[in-house]
Image: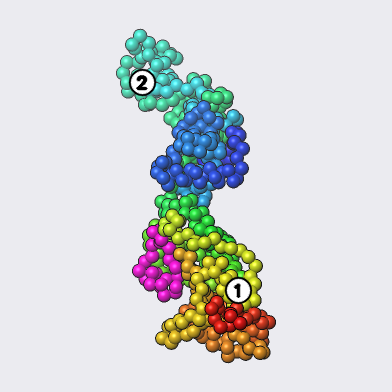
Amino acid sequence: MAKADKEVEATETPQAVSDSERDEIAMKLVAAMLAAKIVDIKPQLDFTTELGFIYPVVEQTVNVKGMEAVSIVESLTDKGILKRSFFDRLLRCPRCHSVNLRPSTHCPKCGSGDVARGRILEHSACGYVGVEDEFTTGGRYVCPRCKIELRTMGADYQSRGVLRKCRDCGEVFSVPQIKWRCLKCSSLAGEDEVGEVTVYSYSLDETKRNWLDFELQSKAQFLEFLRQHGYEVTENARVKGRSGAEHCIDMLATRDDGVITHNVAIGVEIARDRIELDRILDFDVKAYDSGIHDKVLIIIPGLGEEAEKFATYQRIKVLEPKDLEMVLTGGLQPDQEVVKEPFEFKSKSQLIQYLKKQGYIVKENAEVKGRSGAAHNIDIVATRDEGIITHRVAIGIEVDEKPMGLNKVFDFDDKAYDAGILDKVFIAVPGLTREASQFAKRQGISVFEVGQLEPEPPEEGSPESQN
C-alpha cells in the first residue's frame, strides 16, 4: 500500500466491497499474473485523483479503483503473494490532502517568500549587499545606496557568489527555508506539516508460483475428485496424536463405508525446487502419530532421490504434477456412483452385496501370500482402487457357540499383518471375550459382534436347492 510515514487521513471513499468479493477480485488479479497477462503492477501518477496515483492494470483487470485497488494489492503483499518495490514518495497537503504540491523558497529569518536568487555583490565603501540586478544601471555597476559607480572588483566591490536575498528583511543566505504550496487549496505548509506517502510497484513472488498454481486451479478439482469418491474432506485438520501432540494435516479425507472408516492423510508440499527428505519425514511422523496409515502426498515440482525412496518404503502415495494432472483430467474417475445406505447384514452374502455397492471388488476365501512367504486364507478380501489410494480390507468371520477368546483374533490379525493389509474387520458370532475385544481395539480391528448369521441359500443347481 502507499504507506504514510506520518499519519495521513484518507479522504477517498472506497468502493463498497465485501471481504468475500475482495478475495475473489484478488484471486482474479493473481490468476492474470500467473497467466503472464500482467508482468508487474506499476503506479501511474495522476494528480486529478485524491491519491495522486492509480494502478491502471488493476483497474483494467478487475475494475476497482483508488483505495480499493491499493487495499487489494497490499492484502496480497501481506499474504506473501506479491512483493513490493519502492516507486516514489509523494507529499500530501495537511489541509485538503492533495498530493499536488510545489516547493517554494522562503527567508529563514522572516519567513517571507519574496526572495531573489543571483550573484551577490557587496560595495566595499558603504557595505551595501544585494543581488547583481540591483547594481546594474545602463550597463554599469552603481551602488543603489550611495550611487557610487563600482569599477574594479576587489577594490570597489566584492562578489560573494550565487546566494539568495530576502527583499523584505534584506537577509542574505545560501540555504532557504522550503515550504510547500498546495495547487488545489493554495495553502502553504512547512516541511514539518506535510505528510509523506510512499508509493510502491508490485510483482509476483516467484517462489510462490507453484503453490498459487495449485491453490487457484488444481486444489478445487482435487477436492471435488475426493468428494466424488464419497469422502468428506477437512482442510487444515487438527488431529491429536497418540503422543498427545496436536498435528495439522493439510487435508483429512474421511469415508465411512459402514464396515470400516477410511481416513486418508493428504499432505501438500510445494516449492521451487525438488522436495527433500525432511519434509516427507515430517508428514509421515504426523500421520503415524495420528494413527492414519493411508497417506497421500501432493508434491510440486517433484521429490529428491532419497525422499522418493523413503516415500516408497513408507507406502506413501506420491502425486507429482503428471499424476495430479491424470487425476484432474478425468483419467481416474470412480467406476460407479457410491451408494450411501445404512450398513446392516444378516448373512455373508448380504455383506458381500453391500461391499459391492460401495465400489469394492470382493474375493471370498482369498488366498494371499504374506511377506514371510506363507500363504494365508482370508474369508473376504475387499479391494477398492481409487487411483490415488487402493483400499484392501481383510474380513474375518468366526462362528462359535460362545464368545471367542484371544487366539482367533490374534490369528486373524497375524495373517492380515503378514499380508500387508492394514484395514481389518472381524465378524464374531456370537461375540468376543473382554480380553479379545481389548486386543482388537489395540490393533485397530473393527469388530462386529453378531448374535447369529442367517444360513446362506444353497447355490442354484445344488442338491440342497432341489429339496
> Residue flagged by tag 1: what amino acid is it?
Gln
Between residues 225 and 184, which one lies in front from this camera angle? 225
**Residue in the image at 36% along x and 66% along y:** 304
The local crowd at label 1, few if under 14, some if 14 to 19, many if 20 or more residues have their Cα within 10 Å, is some
Within the image, what quadrant is residue 426 found in? bottom right
Q: CA distance from mark 2 to mark 1?
A: 121 Å
Between residues 144 and 404, which one lies in front from this camera angle? 404
Between residues 405 and 108, which one lies in front from this camera angle? 405
Identify the element where label 1 is drawn: helix
Q: Which residue is mark 2?
A: 157
Eye-nearest disc, 2 or 1: 1
Split into 4 quadrants, where in the image is the C terminus?
Answer: bottom right
The image shows residue 57 at horizontal and vertical percentages of 45, 37
The answer to if 318 sits in the magenta stretch is yes
**Residue in the image at 56% along x and 83% along y:** 463
Location of residue 137 with respect to 445 vertically, above or below: above
The image shows residue 246 at horizontal and vertical percentages of 58, 69
Most distant residue in the left direction: 152
The answer to whether one can see residue 57 in this image is yes
**Residue in the image at 51% along x and 73% along y:** 362
The range drawn in magenta is: 302-323
Count the marks.
2
Identify the element where label 2 is drawn: strand
Location of residue 259 with respect to 105 vertically, above or below: below
**Residue in the image at 47% along x and 51% along y:** 217
Between residues 142 and 185, which one lies in front from this camera angle? 185
The local crowd at label 2, few if under 14, some if 14 to 19, many if 20 or more residues have their Cα within 10 Å, is many
> Residue flagged by tag 2: what amino acid is it?
Tyr
The image shows residue 84 at horizontal and vertical percentages of 46, 45
Q: Which residue is mark 1?
A: 350
